[in-house]
Image (tube, grey):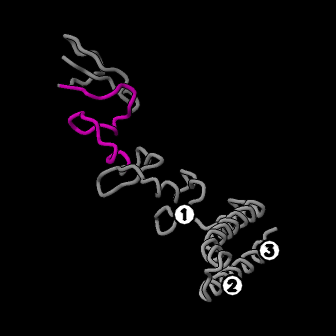
Amino acid sequence: MQYIIIKDGIVTEHGCGSTLPEGAQQVVDFPGVVGLPLAYYKDDWSMKSQAELIREGLESVPEGFRFDGEELVELTYEEKVAAGLEELPPGMKLEDGKLLPATDEELLAAGRITQEAYNERKRGAIAAELDALDARTVRPLRAILSGNGTDEDKFMLGSLEGEAIALRAKLAEFE
């Protein structure tokens, strides 16, 4: 016969024998764990679910989990970030529960990049825009230099140069 011994509300021993020791309680089947309080067991000596233990205040919700109805579920990555359990990935922000790319301005305001890093990013972006403008000037400039340019080519070059002047002025702000 199987038996358990309980002392001070805790199962201290589980055994089998032909006689029942003094103070022991006979059980048909004991799937439990020696050392746990009686409150962890149902009347039939089966273990209560983790959800039951949490609802009864015997255990707390593990970090990184939450209840969804009767089920204990792991938090999503976004929920963990919102709860401070995970760090935001570099260059990202949490908005309406979703991870989205953060702008350089948002990263600077949040202290996630330095002013120098911000300026360097701006200089790089402006330099890329200037390179793209230069590439767009090649065709009209080639036409003009070969003597086949039209007024439209001259207008295009003037327009592109105006954009380049504005970008160079903007670049100077980040020097």
Q: Is residue 74 above or below residue 11?
A: below
Question: Regarding mark 1 in the picture, which secondary structure is present there?
Answer: strand
Q: Considering depth in this image, is 106 or 64 the residue closer to the camera? A: 106
Q: Is residue 3 left or right of residue 77?
A: left
Q: Which mark is residue 101?
A: 1
Q: Nearer the viewer, mark 2 or mark 1?
A: 2
Residue 11 is one of the magenta-drawn residues: no
Q: Amino acid at mark 1?
A: Pro
Q: Earlier in the sequence, mark 3 or mark 2?
A: 2
The part of the image, by quadrant, that contains residue 151 is: bottom right
Density class for disc 3 (Cα within 10 Å; few <14, some 14-19, many ≥20) is: few
Density class for disc 1 (Cα within 10 Å; few <14, some 14-19, many ≥20) is: some
By secondary structure, the bulk of the magenta-drawn segment is best described as loop
Q: Nearer the viewer, mark 1 or mark 3?
A: 3
Q: Residue at x 22, y 19 (%)?
A: 2
Q: Is residue 148 above or below residue 48?
A: below
Residue 53 is situated, as x and y percent measured from the top left of the image, at 35, 45
Q: Nearer the viewer, mark 3 or mark 2?
A: 2
Residue interval drawn in magenta: 29-54
Task: Tell me if label 1 and label 3 are in contact, CB under 8 Å.
Answer: no
Q: Residue at x 30, y 29 (%)?
A: 32
Q: Residue at x 68, y 76 (%)?
A: 145
Q: Which residue is mark 2?
A: 158
Task: Tell me if label 3 and label 2 are in contact, CB under 8 Å.
Answer: no
Q: Considering depth in this image, is 64 or 106 the residue closer to the camera? A: 106
Residue 43 is one of the magenta-drawn residues: yes
Residue 105 is situated, as x and y percent measured from the top left of the image, at 66, 70
Q: Amino acid at mark 2?
A: Gly
